[in-house]
Image: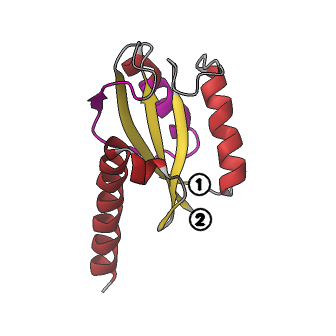
Amino acid sequence: MPFYIVAVGSNIEAEKHIQQAFELLKKMDSQVNIATLLHTKAVGFTEQADFINTAFSFDYVLNATDLKAELKNIETQLGRVRTSNKNGPRTIDLDIVKVDQNIVDEDYHQYDFVKKSVDELAERQARKRCGSKAAAN
């Protein structure tokens, strides 16, 4: 089963929408994890509210293409409206950044806050796996 890390961002009622997205993902995997919430300035289009960014990690049976469709459905449920301004305000933004050990989104390399959240969850997962292997021996 693939292990995913999804970057999360919001600047419209951010804490509420991040919590709602987390609860919806818990229906997919009850063991979903969340990274530390980071308060960040808007990037690109700066005439808007600051963002809260984080990441979620979880195991899921779907392939990345199907999971991406599920994430878009969650965004729609939470009121995300896509406009021509890619960097505009949003209720929630959910992007797959890592699948197993592979970085699949350039935002990881481009934005420090994405890297920080993804690395936090990847390290947590690595410690969990090490603990599982030690217990098995």
Could you tell me which residue is drawn at 71 percent across and 52 percent down?
A: 65
Could you tell me which residue is drawn at 32 percent across and 41 percent down?
A: 113
Q: Is residue 80 above or below residue 103?
A: above
Which of the colour schemes (rainbow, by chain, secondary structure, one colour) is used? secondary structure
Question: Element under label 1?
Answer: loop
Can you give x and y, in whole percent of width and height, for residue 131 in the image? 28, 71
Cα distance between the residues tagged 2 and 1: 6 Å
Q: Quadrant of residue 129?
A: bottom left
136 sits left or right of 92 in the view: left
Quadrant where the image shows the C terminus: bottom left
Q: Which residues are magenta?
A: 18-43
Whichever of labels 2 and 1 marks the residue nearer the N terminus, that label is: 2
Q: Is residue 73 visible?
A: yes
- Please tell me whether residue 34 belongs to the stretch shown in magenta: yes
Could you tell me which residue is drawn at 51 percent across and 26 percent down?
A: 87
Number of the label disc, if any, that sits on residue 117: none
58 sits left or right of 114 in the view: right
Give amino acid for label 1: Tyr
Can you give x and y, in whole percent of width and height, for residue 71 in the image? 62, 37
Question: Element under label 2?
Answer: loop
Q: Which residue is identified by label 2?
A: 1
Q: Residues within 10 Å of mark 1 (few under 14, many from 20)?
A: some
59 sits left or right of 57 in the view: right
Give amino acid for label 2: Met
Can you give x and y, in whole percent of width and height, for residue 130 in the image? 30, 74
Q: Which of 29 and 38 lies nearest the eye of the viewer?
A: 38
50 sits left or right of 67 in the view: left
Can you give x and y, in whole percent of width and height, for residue 70 in the image? 67, 39
